[in-house]
């Protein structure tokens, strides 16, 4: 899996001439984060005349968290650990900077059954946006969402060297610490029957027609899906019609998403919409006020 590694994305972009010559189309970083979250942020940027700050928060979480990590594998444990150990690009004072993963933790409250989550820097979520908007947008950052306490534990594991990729000598054998961690905790974090949810919030602040404006797209977890909707502070919108769809449906619609106001996205392993609707009781979701 190459998505989420910005350095590899730049290597892929370096192959553009060869791809064009052979008629091949490659769209890297096109998942949830990076991917959907960047599309939402770009849409918000396009709605404003000037942009002062962009903040993205995303987390794939278990609906029934179990200690001590309150996390379950929804795609790749190796990928998660890579994000936790790689420096994260941000924009500050319109300049690119790198900050440590798992740092600058803050609380983001989603209310309802999800409640407060902790947000912290991880690598890859912004993709190439800091390079595109350096000198144009003063502040931009991406943070991963987890249940409270997760980052503190993972930071301790990392700082003890247990996520290192450098082999160490153990009783005469060379062992990679991260391989041991993956082998030891990976099976405990796999929940074949576990349901997951996605918490998402994208905030774009700036001006429109000379007046301050803040746009926020946020997720509203319901059963095995989440809904997202733009709203502008101080304004209201009519309730749109619910759109039905699966992960593949979302992928097909992604290219035209900026013209859409509403989307339902079924998470990994979720059933078809009809079955999900019958079990969850969800029939429609309205714009937040």
Image (cartoon, helix red, strand yellow):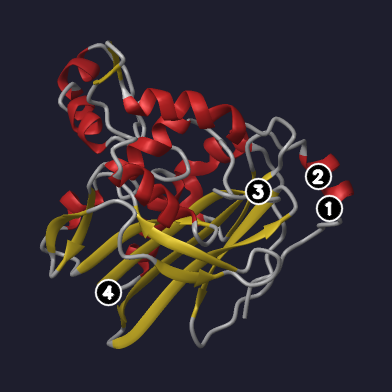
Cα separation, mark 1 vs mark 4, equals 40 Å
Q: Secondary structure at mark 3?
A: loop
Circle 1 packing at 10 Å, graded few (<14), some (14-19), many (20+), is few
Mark drawn on residue 49: 4
Q: Which of the 4 image quadrants contains residue 227?
A: bottom right
Q: Are marks 2 and 3 in contact (CB under 8 Å)?
A: no
Answer above or below: position of 16 versus 38: above
Cα separation, mark 3 vs mark 4, equals 45 Å
Cα separation, mark 4 vs mark 2, equals 40 Å
Q: Which residue is mark 3?
A: 66
Q: Earlier in the sequence, mark 3 or mark 4?
A: 4
Q: Which residue is mark 2?
A: 276
Q: Are marks 4 and 2 in contact (CB under 8 Å)?
A: no
Which residue of the protein is positioned furthest toward the front in this rendering?
Answer: 171
Q: Earlier in the sequence, mark 4 or mark 2?
A: 4
Answer above or below: position of 93 versus 83: below
């Amino acid at each position: 899996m190459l998505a989420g590694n910005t350095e590899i994305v730049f290597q892929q972009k370096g192959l553009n001439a060869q791809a064009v010559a052979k008629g091949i189309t490659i769209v890297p970083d096109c998942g949830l984060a990076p991917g959907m979250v960047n599309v939402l942020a770009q849409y918000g940027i396009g709605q404003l005349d000037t942009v002062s700050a962009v903040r993205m928060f995303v987390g794939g979480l278990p609906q029934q968290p179990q200690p001590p990590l309150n996390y379950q594998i929804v795609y790749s444990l190796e990928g998660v650990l890579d994000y936790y150990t790689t420096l994260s690009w941000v924009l500050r004072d319109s300049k690119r900077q790198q900050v440590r993963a798992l740092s600058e933790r803050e609380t983001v409250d989603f209310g309802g059954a999800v409640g407060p989550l902790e947000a912290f820097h991880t690598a890859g979520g912004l993709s190439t946006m800091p390079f595109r908007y350096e000198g144009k947008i003063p502040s931009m950052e991406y943070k991963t969402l987890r249940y409270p306490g997760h980052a503190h534990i993972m930071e301790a594991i990392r700082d003890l060297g247990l996520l290192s990729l450098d082999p160490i000598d153990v009783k005469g054998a060379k062992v990679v610490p991260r391989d041991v961690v993956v082998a030891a905790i990976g099976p405990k974090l796999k929940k074949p029957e576990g349901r997951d949810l996605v918490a998402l919030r994208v905030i774009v602040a700036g001006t429109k027609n000379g007046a301050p404006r803040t746009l926020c797209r946020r997720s509203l977890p319901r059963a095995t899906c989440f809904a997202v909707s733009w709203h502008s502070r101080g304004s209201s919108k009519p309730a749109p019609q619910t759109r039905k769809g699966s992960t593949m449906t979302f992928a097909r619609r992604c290219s035209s998403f900026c013209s859409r106001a509403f989307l339902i996205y079924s998470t990994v392993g979720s059933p078809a919409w009809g079955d999900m609707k019958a079990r969850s009781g969800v029939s429609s979701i309205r714009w937040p006020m």
